[in-house]
Image (spheres, rainbow, N blue to C red):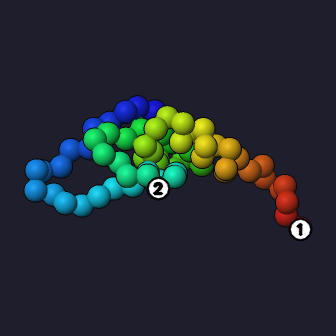
């Protein structure tokens, strides 16, 4: 979990978005790893908590028939 800068050449017009809420990433992003081991980029540290609330860890065998 760390803040990282977005480094692009001055003439790059591509845009990047938060993997959690979809907001535009401007100059930096918050990188974190989910409980499933997936690395995500977010616009704020709060999005890490939002992702944890929206996608709680699953327990093996729960909810299966």
Seen in the picture, residue 60 relative to 3 is either above or below; the reply is: below
Looking at the picture, tell me which residue is in the foreground, 33 or 21. Answer: 21
Seen in the picture, residue 59 relative to 28 is either above or below; the reply is: below
> What residue lies at 84% left-to-right and 55% top-to-bottom?
62
In the rendered image, residue 12, in percent from the top left (x then y), is placed at 15, 57
Gap in Å between the C-alphas at discs 1 and 2?
34 Å
> What residue lies at 42% left-to-right and 38% top-to-bottom?
30
Which tag is nearer the camera, tag 1 or tag 2?
Answer: 2
In the rendered image, residue 7, in percent from the top left (x then y), is placed at 21, 44
> What residue lies at 60% left-to-right and 38% top-to-bottom?
49
Badge 2 density bin: few <14, some 14–19, many ≥20, Cα 10 Å: few
Looking at the picture, tell me which residue is in the foreground, 2 or 62. Answer: 2
Badge 1 density bin: few <14, some 14–19, many ≥20, Cα 10 Å: few
Which residue matches tag 2?
Answer: 22
Can the viewer see residue 31? no
- Under circle 1, the secondary element is loop
CB within 8 Å, label 1 to label 2 = no
In the rendered image, residue 27, in percent from the top left (x then y), is placed at 28, 41
Quarter of the view holding residue 53: top right
Left of 65 or right of it: where is 55?
left
Query: Where, quadrant-wise, is the C terminus in this rendering?
Result: bottom right
Mark number, residue 65: 1
In the rendered image, residue 33, in percent from the top left (x then y), is placed at 51, 42
Left of 28 or right of it: where is 8?
left
Looking at the picture, tell me which residue is in the foreground, 22 or 48. Answer: 22
> What residue lies at 78% left-to-right and 52% top-to-bottom?
60
Can the viewer see residue 45? yes
Left of 46 or right of it: where is 4?
left
Name which of mark 1 and mark 2 comes first in the sequence: 2
Furthest toward the top, the residue is 2
């Amino acid at each position: 979990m760390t803040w990282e800068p977005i480094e692009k050449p001055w003439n790059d017009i591509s845009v990047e978005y938060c993997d959690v809420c979809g907001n535009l990433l401007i100059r930096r992003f918050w990188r974190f790893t989910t409980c499933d081991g997936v690395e995500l980029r977010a616009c704020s540290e709060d999005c890490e908590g939002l992702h944890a609330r929206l996608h709680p860890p699953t327990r093996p065998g729960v909810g299966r028939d």
